Image (spheres, helix red, strand yellow):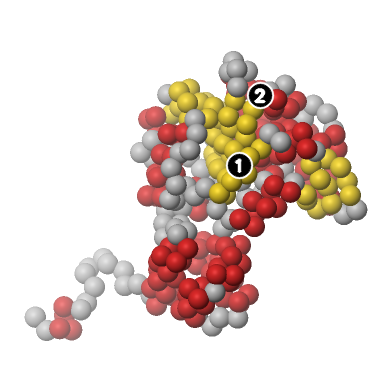
Amino acid sequence: MSSSHRDQPAAGQRQKSHTDIELSLLLDAIFQRYHYDFRQYAAASLKRRVQTALSHFGCETISRLQERVVREPKLFSDLLRFLTVQVSDLFRDPSYFRSLREKVVPYLRTYPSLKVWVAGCATGEEAYSLAILLAEEGLLDRTLIYATDINPESLRTAEAGIYDIERFKRFSESYALAGGRASLSNYYTARYSSAVFDRSLKKAILFSDHSLATDSAFAEVELASCRNVLIYFERQLQDRAIGVLYESLCRKGFLGLGLKETLRFSSYATAFNEFVREDRIYQRI
């Protein structure tokens, strides 16, 4: 057989583009240099974010970005903003929080103490949403909320609990739709153009670094909320992440996912009951 025939891709096998190859090499380099693993993130979404990063860093090619990332740790810290999705709102998808309040909280009341895990907390809005909800249900004083993310800059923002005051009109509307029992303004202090969450909320939340791609379960929790994270993972990594969440949950513990996410096609589908199907709340069997 001639070498030209041997080098042809097999039938049905897609030949990788140079962009795919460069992206793969960039992700390998990041893993080897910094131990952050993006290799099983959804390729299409990741490719769009890397293209945006190229423009920001003034790099003509992904290969050039790879070279700089390996040599410049500060650049990698900046690049994390592009590789991780930091879209977050207070009481995002209000029906989810209403279902937690009305259907899950009655079960949580039966525990003498509670641990809650917000996985992929981004800049912290969901963690504060849960803290407010639990405070209004009289449970916050016996709850520890673990809020984790892989982006140190986002975690610093989350821990500070300071947000643009202009966002709070929308936050207040979502809070009301989520079944809020008071005024959202009860939980923050306005300072110039910012709003600072109360210390009573902050002291219940422990912000820390954790990667669903590489780390394991670190505590047993009664509720894990991992919303709008799995949609950015390929199937194999989704299964790994769900496995970590499963291992962290106590028996009969609850798992909340994003409204576009499901356990239905994962290898853990039979390990959970659909507790509130429309709001993607599951209960470990």
> Relative to 15, is 202 above or below?
above
Callout 1 amino acid: Ala
Which residue is located at x 63 percent, y 22 percent?
A: 105
Question: Residue 62 in the image: x percent, y percent?
Answer: 48, 76
Q: Is 53 positioned to the left or the right of 133 in the image? A: left
Q: Is 197 positioned to the left or the right of 3 in the image? A: right
First reached walking from the N terminus: tag 2 or tag 1: 2
Question: Residue 52 in the image: x percent, y percent?
Answer: 59, 71
Which is more toward the observer, 102 or 241? 241
How far apart in space, not on screen, are marks 2 and 1 (Cα)? 16 Å
Which is more toward the observer, 199 or 14? 199
Q: Quadrant of residue 25?
A: bottom left
Q: Which residue is mark 1?
A: 147
Which residue is located at x 57 percent, y 36 percent?
A: 117
Q: Which mark is residue 142?
A: 2
Question: Residue 44 in the image: x percent, y percent?
Answer: 48, 63
Specify few, some or many for label 2: CA neighbours under 10 Å numbering under 14, 14-19, or 20 or more: some
